[in-house]
Image (cartoon, rainbow, N blue to C red):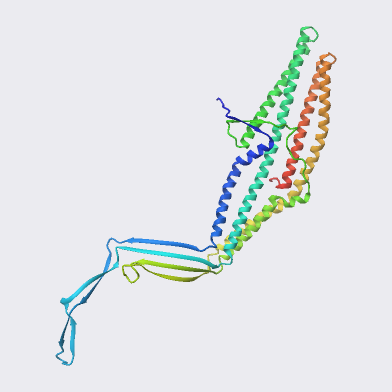
């Protein structure tokens, strides 16, 4: 399959960290979570404001009901035969006029306006606002802690890449030197100045160096591909490393204070989480206490309440007492659940405080060892480089044998790689110490 490279990305260690922060999936998910916590904060703030609702209903009745009324227009009277002084009057049945009043009209309208305001609820709304604000801050700090650990991971991996880049350069230089030796030995053999054994030895050493060169090149390219995965870069982009292990930008001026670990971001974050859960318990406890609400309501309808075909309405004001006397112990169960979470975080907190001292001591020990190794290997690398330059001159002048030159060549390779490895380990020890002092290592 043909891979088409659309663009080249030149990276140094700081740019690699910057890209990782922008493209990491976990950080992008945390940003989405932050949006959710911001929405929760806005929702919590809304509870202190009056809750206003409007409700309108239109009803259509296919078969409206009516009330039928009858009223006489004429009365008939006569004298009581048994009591002549009594005159009896009754309505004339033939004069009754009937009328209908809609009891369930065909079209009816209802409108309701309600304003509800908490008067006293044990400051639950204020506590909910503070809780939502703390949760938003915790999530934001949690993202910062993750970003710091991600930066440390990227830096450590990037230093491995720089080490293999330098190892690749060393083997590349060695391969060129051994190729010159092989060509020189071949000419000397043709002129009768070198034996077949010398020529064979030169060829074997050249092929061995070529194998080491190709193997190191493959490892370096594999690391670049893995870095592309860590940075979440598309396959169409190719990484070009512009810095080296000798000039990499790592801040080596760390302020080492053992008391600083007490104020690490991850430890302070656990403290805030416990305090936030305690606030949540206070809110849950207030649910079983009496609460008072005020409510203003306006009800309007057509037909009016007296069945007249017009709008009519009434205003009402209510004070509402809401007291949840028994909820089947659900509130207590929620409180116990939160207390369990607090206990779990407390265990993690104690563990982090204890291990922070161990982590710091290990990081300091590793840094001291790395410093000593760096000083030793740096001196050896300088000596081996001078020795190799001298050996080249002596070999070209026939003063030393092939075997002696190869031994010096191998010593040069080993000392140079050891120095670059020590330099990498020193920088990684600094990155590790900075991580321990700032946010701690995951256990």
Q: Position of residue 362 (x, y in %)?
A: 77, 44
Q: Is residue 54 left or right of residue 276?
A: left
Task: Judge whether 47 appears above or below 72 on screen.
Answer: above
Task: Please tell me which residue is depicted at 74% across the width and 49% down the height of the picture.
Answer: 356
Location of residue 434 in the rendering, given as x and y in whole percent from the top left corner: 73, 44
Q: Is residue 199 something that shows in the picture? A: no
How many numbered badges does the structure rendering display?
0
Most extreme residue toward the front is: 310
Give the quadrant of residue 159: top right
Is 34 situated left or right of 60 in this image? right
Q: Position of residue 258 (x, y in %)?
A: 78, 49
Is residue 412 left or right of 94 when viewed as pictured?
right
- In percent of the image, x 36 and y 66: which residue is there? 301
Quadrant housing residue 251? top right
Task: Please name the residue shown 69% across and 31% down the image.
Answer: 242
At which x and y percent is residue 135?
A: 61, 54
Q: Residue furthest right?
A: 399
Q: Quadrant of the rendered structure where residue 78 is?
A: bottom left
Looking at the figure, which quarter contains the N terminus?
top right
Above/below status of 344 relative to 115: above
Q: Viewer-proximal residue, 329 or 373?
A: 373
Q: Is residue 165 visible?
A: yes
The answer to which of 67 and 278 lies nearer the viewer is 67
Between residues 146 and 249, which one lies in front from this camera angle?
249
Q: Is residue 283 above or below residue 149?
A: below
């Amino acid at each position: 399959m043909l891979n088409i490279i659309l663009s080249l990305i030149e990276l140094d260690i700081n740019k690699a960290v910057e890209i990782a922060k922008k493209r990491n999936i976990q950080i992008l998910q945390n940003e989405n979570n932050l949006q959710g916590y911001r929405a929760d904060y806005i929702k919590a703030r809304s509870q202190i404001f009056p809750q206003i609702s409007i409700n309108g209903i239109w009803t259509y009745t296919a078969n409206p009901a009516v009330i039928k009324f009858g009223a006489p227009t004429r009365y008939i009277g006569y004298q009581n035969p048994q009591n002549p002084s009594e005159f009896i009057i009754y309505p004339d049945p033939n004069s009754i006029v009937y009328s209908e009043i809609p009891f369930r009209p065909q079209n009816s309208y209802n409108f309701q306006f309600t304003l509800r305001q908490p008067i006293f609820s044990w400051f639950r709304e204020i506590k909910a606002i503070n809780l939502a604000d703390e949760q938003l801050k915790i999530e934001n700090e949690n993202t910062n802690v993750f970003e710091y650990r991600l930066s440390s991971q990227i830096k450590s991996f990037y230093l491995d890449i720089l080490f293999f880049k330098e190892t690749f350069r060393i083997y590349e230089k060695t391969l060129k030197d051994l190729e010159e030796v092989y060509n020189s030995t071949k000419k000397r053999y043709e002129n009768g100045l070198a034996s077949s054994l010398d020529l064979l030895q030169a060829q074997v050493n050249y092929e061995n160096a070529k194998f080491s060169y190709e193997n190191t090149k493959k490892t370096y390219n594999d690391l670049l591909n893995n870095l592309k995965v860590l940075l979440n870069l598309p396959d169409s982009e190719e990484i070009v490393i512009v810095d080296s292990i000798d000039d990499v930008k790592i801040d080596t001026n760390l302020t080492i204070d053992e008391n600083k670990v007490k104020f690490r971001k991850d430890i302070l974050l656990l403290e805030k989480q416990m305090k936030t859960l305690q606030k949540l318990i206070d809110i849950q406890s207030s649910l079983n206490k009496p609460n008072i609400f005020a409510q203003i309501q306006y009800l309007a309808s057509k037909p009016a309440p007296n069945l007249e075909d017009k709008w009519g309405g009434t205003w009402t004001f209510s004070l509402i007492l809401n007291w949840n006397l028994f909820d089947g112990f659900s509130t207590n169960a929620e409180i116990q659940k939160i207390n369990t979470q607090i206990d779990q975080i407390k265990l993690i907190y104690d563990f982090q405080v204890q291990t922070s001292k161990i982590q710091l001591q290990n990081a300091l020990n590793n840094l001291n060892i790395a410093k000593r190794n760096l000083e030793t290997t740096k001196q050896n690398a300088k000596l081996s480089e001078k020795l190799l330059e001298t050996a080249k001159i002596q070999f070209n002048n026939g003063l030393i044998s092939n075997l002696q030159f190869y031994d010096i060549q191998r010593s040069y390779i080993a000392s140079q790689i050891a120095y670059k490895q020590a330099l990498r380990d020193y920088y990684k020890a600094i990155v590790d110490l900075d991580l321990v002092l700032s946010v701690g290592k995951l256990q």
